[in-house]
Amino acid sequence: MNFKLATWNINSVRLRINLVEKLLAEQNPDVLCLQEIKCINDAFPLKDIRKAGYEHVAINGQKGYHGVAIVSRIPFKKVETKEFCGKGDARHVSVELDVPGGLQLHNFYVPAGGDEPDPEINEKFAHKLAFMREMTEWYGGMKKKSENRMVLVGDLNVAPLEHDVWSHKQLLKVVSHTPIEVDLMNEVIASHDWVDVMRRFVPETEKLYSWWSYRAKDWAAADRGRRLDHIWVTPALKDAPQSMQVLREARGWERASDHVPVIATMKL
DNA sequence: ATGGTAGTCGCACTA
């Protein structure tokens, strides 16, 4: 079957439900993974999502901050959430999709990490590093690597490659692109031989961003972006991806999120 | 070298 997947840090799903509806209408993905929904489960705009044709929703919400959700046309066989760092933060939800061969989809919102890239003096940065170490442990501990059909998406808050940021040199000491974060992200990737789907379609020598700061006067003119959002697949699905698109235009929508949707199609 | 914006919740915090 053909499978279309989107991931988007929405920065408040209640405030931007109209933009979610616009994306679903224009792109018609089978599944949309959202991050930073910024509401408790009961406040999620379920009715609007169902009206758009998405009957299946898995939510791990939290009051005011963070929170992730998966909305889907495809039924779920299982829904799980995992708590990282014992903090009680809502930063992960996963579902088993009812597709031929099965598919586990993991949706993450990794801690941003604050401003100061020193875990000794910035506990938010220490939390981010610990979170990634826990991801490595978790995926490294899973059995049957070569048979696991898994997709991992989300706002991972790390731009690992030189051309995942507008200036490699100027961002080396900026949280999201520091060597310690990049090393830890590479360890997560190595823990289950994850494949970076976005870079399968855009060479590493080309700039590729999914986020532009709200603080720029003119985000498009400055174009100082970073690739903070990712789609990964396990080796069992390495030949599945057929296309990938970063919906840059969504950054210019009215009352936009600072992140744009990343969309992939796969043959399952 | 600094400050710039956005959202939620309530007048501070996270990003």
Image (cartoon, grey):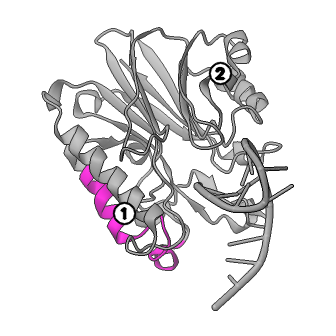
Tell me the residue at 52%/79% (across/down): A170
Mark 2 or mark 1, which is nearer to you?
A: 2
Q: Secondary structure at mark 2?
A: helix
Q: Which residue is mark 1?
A: A181
* Residue lying furthest right: A254
Q: Tell which of A92 and A107 is nearer to you.
A: A92
Majority secondary structure of magenta residues: helix
Q: CA distance from mark 2 to mark 1?
A: 34 Å
**Residue A141 at x, y = what percent?**
16, 37
N-term mark: 2 or 1: 2
> Is A174 colored magenta in this rendering?
yes
A142 displayed left or right of A37: left
Q: Residue at x 63, y 37 (%)?
A: A63
User: Does the segment drawn in magenta span residue A158?
Assistant: no
- Residue at numbered disc 2: A42
- Residue A190 in view in this figure: yes
Q: Chain of mark 1?
A: A
Is A84 rendered above or below residue A224?
above
Q: Nearer the viewer, residue A201 or A42?
A: A42
Q: Where does the magenta region start and end? A: A167-188
Does residue A242 sit above or below A196 in this rendering?
A: above
Front residue of B3/A123: it is A123
Q: Quick one: quadrant of the C terminus of chain A?
A: top left
At a point 57% along the width and 50% down the height, the residue shown is A210
Q: Nearer the viewer, residue A72 or A162?
A: A72
What crowding class fits label 1: few (fewer than 14 Cα within 10 Å), some (14-19), or many (20 or more)?
A: many
